[in-house]
Amino acid sequence: MSDRWRAVVSDTHLPWSTHVAPGPAFAASVRRWWIDDLALVDVECAPTSGSRGRSQIAATDGEFVALLFIRAGHEVIRTNGDTVRLAPGDAVVWDSTRTARFEVPGRLSKRSLLIPRAALAEVSGGAWATPGAVLERGRPAIALLTGYLDTLAGILPGLDPAAVVAARNATLELVLGVLRPAASGGVRDLPLRGSWSASSSSTSRAWRSARSASPASTASPSAP
């Protein structure tokens, strides 16, 4: 089961090493939508853990910014010797070029938005929150983004190509509104430090074309 779960996570997100504890049959479901070259991924899963080390980072085609939203349950993220526990309503920004570990102690429901770094650079010019920042609950910009993604997930399969591109551009603008630190301090940093420049890359479109061409896909590693 661990191999099947690792394959699902790596195919729908980015390369990860994952572990499923022995015991009752592991159950999980993953659904991914493409917003042009952005990936919106919903996960519901039983307890599991995983890591992105040097080998997984090296196996990743391109560099990505990811936003993780906890919808139900808890997830523990460890990086550089520090730990943060995320609860429902929490959101965190992470950088695909940094090592990380996660642990899901119980049933979890979460949503991830994976963005090629070059795509975000199109609208940001390189100014955004420090990678690893936990976004404060209750910020209007976060409520706007999460509500927009909820709506988009429901209508995306019916959008024509031009509308998908428009939705992609709107998503980037809303993400930028969340990632720019608020004047009053709308983020708190986790220890993912160092420079994080917005280097352009040709991998943005290649990442999408190398994966499923379908606008939405569903996978489950659960035993029949």
Image (spheres, rainbow, N blue to C red):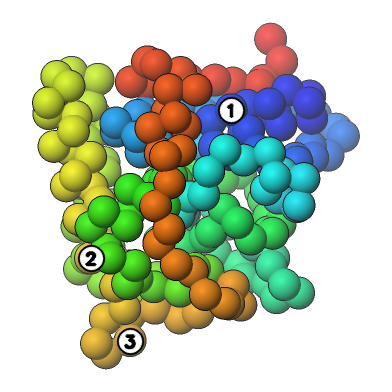
Residue 149 in the figure: left or right of residue 75? left
Of 213 and 9, nearer the camera is 213
What residue would you read off at disc 1? 11
Q: Which mark is residue 185?
A: 3
Secondary structure at badge 2 equals: helix
- Whether residue 134 is visible to the viewer of this picture, yes or no, is no
Q: Nearer the viewer, residue 111 or 7?
A: 7
Specify which label sits upstream in the sequence, 3 or 1. 1
Up/down of 162 relative to 58, above or below = above
Of badges 3 and 1, nearer the viewer stands: 1
Extreme residue in the bottom direction: 184
Residue 58 relative to residue 218: left or right: right
Which type of secondary structure does the marked residue at label 1 adopt?
Answer: helix
Asked which quadrant contains residue 8, the reply is top right
Badge 2: how crowded within 10 Å, few (<14), some, or many (20+)? some
C-alpha distance separating marks 3 and 2? 13 Å
Splitting the image into 4 quarters, where does residue 216 fall?
A: top left
The numbered dot on residue 177 is 2
* Quadrant in the picture for the N terminus: top right
Residue 149 seen anywhere in this rendered image of the structure:
yes
Relative side of 23 to 127, left or right: right
- Nearer to me, 208 or 189: 208
Asked if marks 3 and 1 touch (Cβ < 8 Å), the reply is no
Residue occupying the point 29% across, 31% down: 36
State the image coordinates of residue 159 (x, y, percent, origin top left): 16, 22
> Which quadrant of the rendered structure holds the C terminus?
top right
For the residues labelled 2 and 1, the Cα–Cα distance comes to: 29 Å
> Label 3 vs label 1: CA separation?
35 Å
* Of callouts 2 and 1, the N-terminal one: 1
Q: Residues within 10 Å of mark 1 (few under 14, many from 20)?
A: some
